[in-house]
Amino acid sequence: MQSVASWPSVDWTRLFLLLLLGMTLYRMSAEVIHQVEEALDEDEKEMLLFLCRDVAADVVPLNVRDLLDVLRERGKLSSVSLAELLYRVRRFDLLKRVLKMDRPTAEALLHRHPHLISDYRVLLMEIGEGLDKSDVSSLIFLMRDYMGRGKIAKDKSFLDLVIELEKLNLVAPDHLDLLEKCLRNIHRIDLKTKIQKYKQSAQGVETNYVNALQASLPNLSIKDPSYNLRLQNGRSKEHRLMMGQPDIQREPVKTSIQESEAFLPQTFFRKPSLPWAMKSSVSYISLWKI
């Protein structure tokens, strides 16, 4: 019996991609959704609902079961996406039990497959995990200057606070300055640093996109002689149009010497007459020779 390593012409990359495609196209059954929903606690359910707010923005699911069912109906709940959700809430036991997948395999899928959850949602969830109750209470108190008194109860979670801030357009993927300032005020510099790293990463992605766009365009320079000639011709045409002259290219007309003489006065080509003294001298010389 041949070993797997000795199999001829096996393209493992293609095989992995086919396996990944099969996992992507496979839709979760209602039984799997029910099994996952029953295994999660209340905090994990809250995190899942928060993480998927952008994925199903037009629907406000009442619970995780409704959320997963909506994603399944829209073709967004595959083995890969469910593995991502379970990985984000750190339920690696469910990865193994439900999807027969270990943590390294899930991480490899996250590196190779487009993410269902945005980096912005992951960032806020990680910040919430790093806050204790006193930190959340302090943040709610500081936000009164921007949200108003009584907008959110003191016993609410950090994710509840973020949702209210998003409704007031005080927090967004490109607007995290207020949250960063409040984290600095409660001396959570470690969490403030997370926001700064997120901003740097977002700017890096944008810069790479701009660089790629510039690289795809032709490299033109205004010092190029052909460019200057085209520019000059364009300006001369515009000048002729503004002056009411037709855009006609004028070439010099070639004429012969005889043709040019016909248009000039005859006196111009008449032989100059000699002075009187010279005439007399010529006549005298002629007579002397005779």
Image: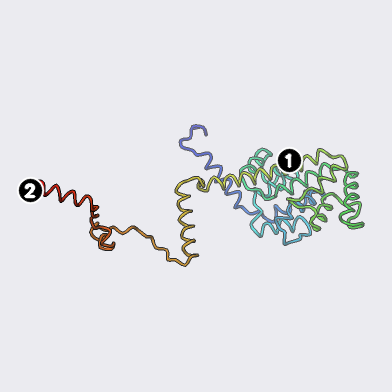
Residue 105, horizontal then vertical, whole percent: 65, 40
Residue 197 numbered tag: 1
Residue density around tag 2, few if under 14, some if 14–19, many if 20 or more, within 10 Å: few
The amino acid pointed to by label 1 is Lys
Report the side of 267 relative to 245 (left or right). Answer: left
- Indicate the quadrant where residue 181 lies: top right
Name the image quarter holding residue 134. Answer: top right
Point out residue 266 in the picture as x, y percentages from the top left corner.
25, 62
Indicate left or right for 59 with 207 as reference: right
Does 70 appear above or below 107?
below
Vertical relation: 156 (above or below) 238? above
**Residue displayed at 28% across by 63% down:** 263
Q: In this rendering, which labeled residue sits more in front, label 2 or label 1?
A: 2
Q: Position of residue 187 (x, y in %)?
A: 87, 39
> Mark 2 sits on what residue?
290
Q: Are marks 2 and 1 in contact (CB under 8 Å)?
A: no
Q: Nearer the viewer, residue 288 or 74?
A: 288
The residue most toward the left is 290
Task: Tell me which label, 2 or 1, sits earlier in the chain.
Answer: 1
Residue at the outermost bottom position = 244
Q: Residue at x 90, y 46 (%)?
A: 138
Position of residue 253 in the picture relative to residue 178 (left or right):
left
Question: Disc 2 marks which amino acid?
Answer: Ile
Q: CA distance from mark 2 to mark 1?
A: 120 Å
Q: Secondary structure at mark 2?
A: loop
Helix, strand or loop at label 1? It is helix
